[in-house]
Amino acid sequence: MISKRHYAIILSILASLVLQIMPLPMQVDLYRPDWILVVLAYWAMALPHRVNVGVAFLSGLAMDILLGTTLGIHSLGLSISIYILAANYQRLRNYSVWQQAIIIGLLSSFYHLITFWVQHLLTDIYFQVDYLLPVVTSMAIWPWVFWMLRKIRRQLSIN
């Protein structure tokens, strides 16, 4: 049974999905951060026994449905990225927030390269540097998302 405290995890993932599909002007949309990846990365580092590859896979399926992409593209990218993070979470917890932002940037670029590679196999798209612009904004928002979710986790005593 899910306690009331654990709804914060579910609500934060749902909020990140909403932010991921929120309409933005075309010039700003190129820089849209990977909200779902950043939120899942926080929870996978903070509570690896609660948020893991399975949650990333289901969140990726939800994102595939919301974005109208082929089922499994974002699931695969998120699952592999969160697996890498979950396998090294004890080491990553000891880094400073700014060092973690660099790791998030690497994970985000890896996520984008996986989704591009799968889309390239399925359709005829070609690589553009614009695909990696969200990496910069994901790195930039990491400290604020980290501090906000940590404050929520501590206030609600989620463990």
Image: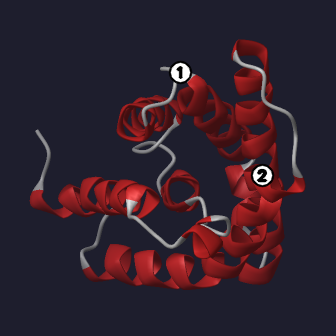
Sort mark 2 into few (<14), some (14-19) or many (20+) by Cα contacts within 10 Å. some
Relative vertical location of residue 153 with respect to residue 84 in this rendering, above or below: below
Q: Which residue is mark 2?
A: 131
Residue 12 percent across, percent down from the top left:
33, 63
Residue 105 percent across, percent down from the top left:
79, 63
Sort mark 1 into few (<14), some (14-19) or many (20+) by Cα contacts within 10 Å. many
Q: Residue at x 59, y 59 (%)?
A: 34
Q: Which mark is residue 72?
A: 1
Determine whether, in the image, residue 145 is placed left or right of residue 133. Answer: left
Type of the residue with mark 2: Tyr
Q: Residue at x 42, y 75 (%)?
A: 149
Give the camera-side residue of 57 and 61: 61
Q: Residue at x 43, y 40 (%)?
A: 67
Type of the residue with mark 1: Gly
What colour-coding does the image apply? secondary structure
Residue 137 percent across, percent down from the top left:
69, 74
Q: Quadrant of the N terminus?
A: top left
Q: Residue furthest top?
A: 122
Q: Which mark is residue 100?
A: none
